[in-house]
């Protein structure tokens, strides 16, 4: 099926190149190309791909770092009518070869033959200039039913599924961006930041080139923190799409050219939002890979800061989102359920995976739909809120717990920028590193472990944070261990890499009857379990009234009188118990 009124992204960028030939299209630190230059490079590479056999029935794999060659290869692949498969140049060659074979790629664009599987044609990303007129590689009309790209789903083990995204989904997203952001303007500079294997770079490419603006390529060593802030300033970036954890890492540097920041990938905390809302337009976004990068956007305002759950917004043009119960029936506004995305932005399914495709994808009234597996709700005004994953619930002390809900509660604590909650089976003597387990409940009860990043200048202890959280949520929602870190480790896609979250040795538990008694008294007074004998109780808001209550209860339970000065000077359960153990009970 062909639609003569349809134009691919490559054709649209070519049309903009004819209108704005001298504008800079893509720039790195040492090289920049204009729209006219980019269009010529795309034509040359598309011709080379066609000569290598690329057409509407083939997949072209790329092993290129983000930058001018990757942008050129993507547009050239679409201009030749083929389907793009971006792979990671930093990944093992054997892995890339395996992914290319699984995708059925017949052509590879790369500077290294190490990543080429047997039988696949290798094409240099910068073919030599050709003299004289060249035959056109452009199709007279685009095919909206054709595939634009394949991209692996995120996964921690096994072989990822390959998501099939159509040209109709890509152009739908480009059109939605134009409606939502408007014309960015000639002076706009959009940061090309995402990894080639994370679909965020597609969003960045469409946003920048779709407005004939300038793409600024981030350095190959993906910057975070102060180096990223310097890059944003040095390159006069106006629009940046950054994972929430990366946004958290940025210092309070002055960035006067930065107009819009889009937070993606994980929940945006109110603490982080407060840092940015007066500095630029702050946008919160949501979208699974299976729905062409982004499905909703929301401009954050001050009213959103009063709630620990910043909305993810309303569906973009061309999308619809419904919230359904386990039987697939729409739920009332405000009620939680599964988010289902409908529209042309929904992918065509998983390549050569009919079972998983049937499980998640279907046709509803002639439109493609995707069951996200995400829990969410819709406010009466239409705003969507993300509530976590359906398959991530675990059992904690007999209660069903959603780790994402605990993360949201932690983000409501003053001074907490980001949080990641994971699970460890109870009784595990050496947890090492943690990773969420969807079937943890099936293997027994679990313990919650949280890693949090505080705001600069704030240095809370894990015990203090547990005590603060206990004042807001039930006991089973308070992690057994909170680890305070400078930053959360990230994957190539900018999401939290939970496999690299180190768990220190838990606090030493009470050992004798006196330590157990003192620990139980303190835990009851501050509202948390698991106080270690070495925890500094000044961290949990020690005050004279609490000291008096500890003294009173020790005397009532153990018959031992301690002065307030002795309790304050001792400071920990272990030392308080040691002082008490040296006293004879008062038998009067």
Image (cartoon, rainbow, N blue to C red):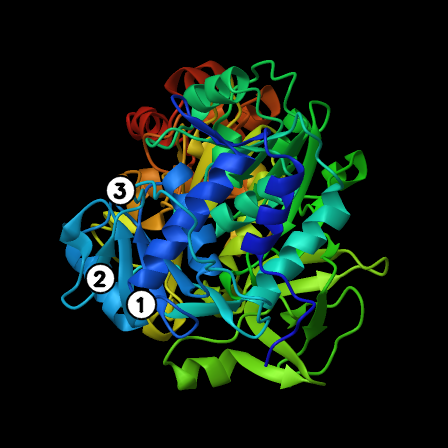
In terms of secondary structure, where does tag 1 sit?
loop
In-front residue for pair 209/386: 209
Q: Residue 176 appears in which quarter of the rendering?
A: bottom right
For the point 38% across and 66% down, the residue is 445
Question: Is residue 375 something that shows in the picture?
Answer: yes
Q: Which residue is mark 1?
A: 53
Question: Is residue 66 something that shows in the picture?
Answer: no
Q: Which residue is mark 2?
A: 121
In terms of secondary structure, where does tag 2 sit?
strand
Quick check: 234 left or right of 114? right
Query: Residue 63 has which mark?
Result: none
Q: Which residue is mark 3?
A: 512
Query: Dots 1 and 3: beta carbons under 8 Å?
Result: no
In-front residue for pair 59/316: 59
Query: Dots 1 and 2: beta carbons under 8 Å?
Result: yes
| Marks 1, 2: nearer the viewer | 1
Query: Extreme right residue here?
Result: 381
The Cα atoms of the two marked residues, 1 and 2, are separated by 9 Å
Mark 3 surroundings within 10 Å by alpha-carbon count, few (fewer than 14), some (14 through 19), many (20 or more): few
Mark 2 surroundings within 10 Å by alpha-carbon count, few (fewer than 14), some (14 through 19), many (20 or more): some
The Cα atoms of the two marked residues, 2 and 3, are separated by 71 Å
Q: Position of residue 227 (x, y in %)?
A: 42, 20
Q: Position of residue 233 (x, y in %)?
A: 54, 17
The numbered mark, 1 or 3, whose residue comes first in the sequence reads 1
């Amino acid at each position: 099926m062909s639609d003569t009124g349809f134009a691919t992204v490559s054709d649209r960028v070519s049309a903009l190149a004819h209108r704005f030939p001298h504008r800079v299209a893509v720039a790195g630190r040492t090289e920049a190309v204009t729209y006219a230059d980019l269009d010529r490079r795309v034509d040359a590479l598309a011709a080379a791909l066609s000569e290598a056999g690329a057409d509407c029935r083939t997949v072209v794999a790329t092993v290129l770092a983000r930058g001018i060659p990757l942008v050129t290869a993507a547009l050239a692949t679409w201009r030749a009518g083929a389907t793009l498969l971006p792979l990671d140049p930093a990944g093992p060659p054997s892995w890339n070869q395996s992914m290319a074979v699984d995708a059925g790629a017949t052509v590879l664009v790369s500077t290294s033959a190490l990543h080429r599987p047997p039988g696949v044609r290798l094409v240099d990303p910068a073919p030599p200039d050709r003299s004289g007129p060249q035959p056109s590689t452009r199709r007279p009309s685009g095919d909206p039913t054709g595939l634009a790209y394949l991209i692996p789903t995120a996964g921690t083990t096994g072989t990822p599924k390959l998501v099939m995204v159509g040209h109709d989904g890509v152009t739908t997203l480009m059109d939605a961006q134009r409606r939502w952001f408007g014309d960015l303007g000639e002076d706009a500079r959009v940061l090309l930041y995402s990894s080639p294997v994370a679909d965020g770079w597609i969003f960045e490419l469409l946003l920048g080139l779709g407005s004939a603006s300038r793409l600024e390529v981030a350095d190959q060593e993906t910057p975070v923190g102060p180096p990223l802030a310097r890059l944003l300033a040095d390159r006069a970036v106006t629009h940046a799409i950054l994972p929430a954890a990366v946004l958290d890492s940025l210092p309070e540097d002055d960035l006067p050219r930065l107009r819009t920041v889009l937070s993606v990938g994980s929940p945006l905390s109110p603490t982080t939002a407060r840092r940015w809302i007066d500095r630029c337009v702050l946008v919160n976004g949501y979208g699974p890979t299976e729905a062409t990068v982004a499905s909703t956007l929301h401009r954050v305002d001050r009213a959103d800061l009063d709630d620990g759950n910043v909305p993810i917004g309303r569906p973009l043009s061309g999308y619809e989102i419904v919230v359904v119960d386990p039987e697939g029936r729409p739920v009332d506004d405000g009620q939680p359920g599964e988010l289902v995305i409908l529209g042309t932005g929904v992918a065509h399914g998983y390549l050569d995976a009919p079972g998983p495709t049937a499980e998640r994808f279907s046709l509803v009234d002639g439109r493609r739909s995707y069951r996200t597996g995400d829990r969410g709700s819709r406010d009466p005004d239409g705003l969507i809120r993300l509530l976590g994953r359906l398959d991530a619930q675990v059992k904690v002390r007999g209660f069903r717990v959603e780790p994402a809900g605990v993360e949201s509660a932690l983000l409501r604590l003053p001074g907490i920028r980001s949080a990641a909650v994971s699970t460890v089976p109870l009784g595990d003597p050496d947890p090492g590193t943690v990773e969420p387990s969807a079937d943890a409940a099936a293997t027994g009860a679990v313990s919650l472990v949280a890693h949090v990043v505080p705001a600069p200048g704030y240095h809370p202890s894990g015990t203090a944070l547990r005590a603060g959280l206990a004042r807001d949520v039930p006991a089973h929602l308070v992690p057994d261990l909170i680890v305070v870190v400078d930053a959360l480790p990230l994957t190539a896609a900018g999401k939290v890499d939970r496999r690299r979250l180190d768990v220190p040795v838990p606090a030493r538990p009470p050992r004798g009857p006196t330590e157990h008694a003192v620990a139980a008294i303190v835990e009851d007074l501050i509202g948390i379990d698991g106080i270690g004998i070495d925890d500094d109780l000044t961290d949990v808001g020690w005050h004279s009234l609490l000291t008096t209550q500890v003294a009173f209860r020790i005397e009532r339970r153990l018959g031992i009188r301690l002065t307030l000065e002795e309790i304050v000077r001792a400071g920990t359960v272990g030392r308080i118990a040691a002082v008490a153990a040296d006293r004879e009970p008062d038998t009067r």
